[in-house]
Amino acid sequence: MPVYRPPLKFRRLFCRFIDHPFEKNLRAVTQKHFAVSGKDIYIDVGIVDAKGEAVIVIENKVNSPLTLGQLRKYNQAKRLVNTRKIAIVKSYFESLSDELQWPVYHWADLYGFYSDAIGRFTKQHVDRFIIQNFLDYLKVLQMQLVRKIAGRDLKELAKAIYAIRNSSYPEAFLGNKSVFQVANDYMNMLGQIVNMARKDEIIFKRWGKSFKFNPWIGWWSKDNDDTGEKGNVWIGIMLYPQKKFKNISYIAAGLEFDNHDREYYKITMGAYSDNYESLFGPVEYKGADLEFEKYATQVIKVWKKWVQ
C-alpha cells in the first residue's frame, strides 16, 4: 500500500479545497483496505493519521462512472462509519442523496483551485514544483476542462462577435477573462460531448464511431435576399451519419449570436435536414450560465430523440 506525504502547503491547500481541518500528520495512501461482510474492498485513496487510521477516504473517477451501488457498498464498512467520505470525478450527471454522505467534487474545480494558488509561491519553492507537475498531469488527463461558463462571459463574447461583424471599426472589451478563452472553453465542452456521444449506444447505432469533433463558425439564420440582411453568427459542431437517416443530414449543437442585439445569444441543439430545416431541442436565452453536466445531458437527450 504506497504511502505519500506531499509538501506541507500542498496538503494544506487540499484540505482547504475540501473544507477539512488541516493536520500536519495526515498522509495519503492508495488502495486503502477495508472489509465488508468478510470480503475485501479497496478504496482509491485514504487520508490517514499518525496511527494509520483513515480520516478521509476518496473515491477517484476519471473515465469510469461513479455508481450508487459502489458507494452503498463502501458505507457498509464498519470502520468507515465515522470517516469522512468524498468522491472526486471528471463529471457526474446524477444527484446523490444526502443520506449517502458522499459529497462529489470535480477535478476541474481542483485544477482551478491549485492554478489560482500557484502564484503565491516562488519559482524555487518545492510546493510550486509539486503543484505545477500536478496541474500538468491533470491536463494530460483533460481534467482542467471548465464545468461552467458564466452568462456574463457569454454576453461579452456576444458583444465581441457583434462588433466584429457589424462595425466598420470594431472594438470590443476583452474583459478580465478573454473572449477567446470563453470561446475555447465552449469548444472544450463540445469536445467532451462528442466523446460522450461516441459511447452512447443509440447514437453509435445510427452514427457509427467515425464522426469526430469538427467545430466551425458561420451564419445560422438565412440571409434575407430582398434586404441583404446578414444572418446570425453560429459557432458549434455538426456530426454527420454514415448514411442519411429519417431525412436527417446531421445533428448539431452550438451558440447562436443575434445580428441585431449585441448581448443576445442562445444555446441550440437538434437535428437538421439538407436545407437547414431545424428540429430544435431546448434553448436557453441570454443571461443564462452554461453548466457542462446540464448542457451535455440536454444535448445527448435531444440527439438521441432524433436518431432513434
Image (tube, grey):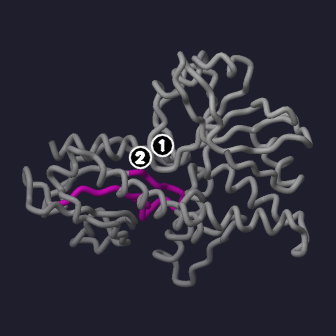
Residue 108 in percent (x, y) is at: 61, 52
Going by the image, does 165 lie left or right of 213? right
User: Amino acid type of disc 1?
Assistant: Glu
Query: Looking at the rendering, which quadrant does residue 129 occupy?
Result: bottom right
Query: Looking at the rendering, which quadrant does residue 22 occupy?
Result: top right
| Residue annotated with mark 1 | 293
Q: What element carries label 1?
A: helix
Which residue is at the front of the view, 13 or 119? 13
Total labels: the figure holds 2
Mark 2 to mark 1 CA distance (whole Å): 5 Å
In the image, residue 137 above or below residue 37:
below
Which residue is at the front of the view, 157 or 145? 145
Which segment did they paint magenta? 250-267
Going by the image, does 65 lie left or right of 100? left
Q: Look at the image and say whether residue 253 sits in the magenta stretch.
A: yes
Residue 71 in percent (x, y) is at: 53, 26
Marks 1 and 2: in contact by CB < 8 Å? yes
Residue 152 in percent (x, y) is at: 62, 53
Q: Look at the image and say whether residue 198 sits in the magenta stretch.
A: no
Going by the image, does 15 lie left or right of 254? right
| Residue annotated with mark 2 | 296
The quarter in which the C terminus is drawn is top left
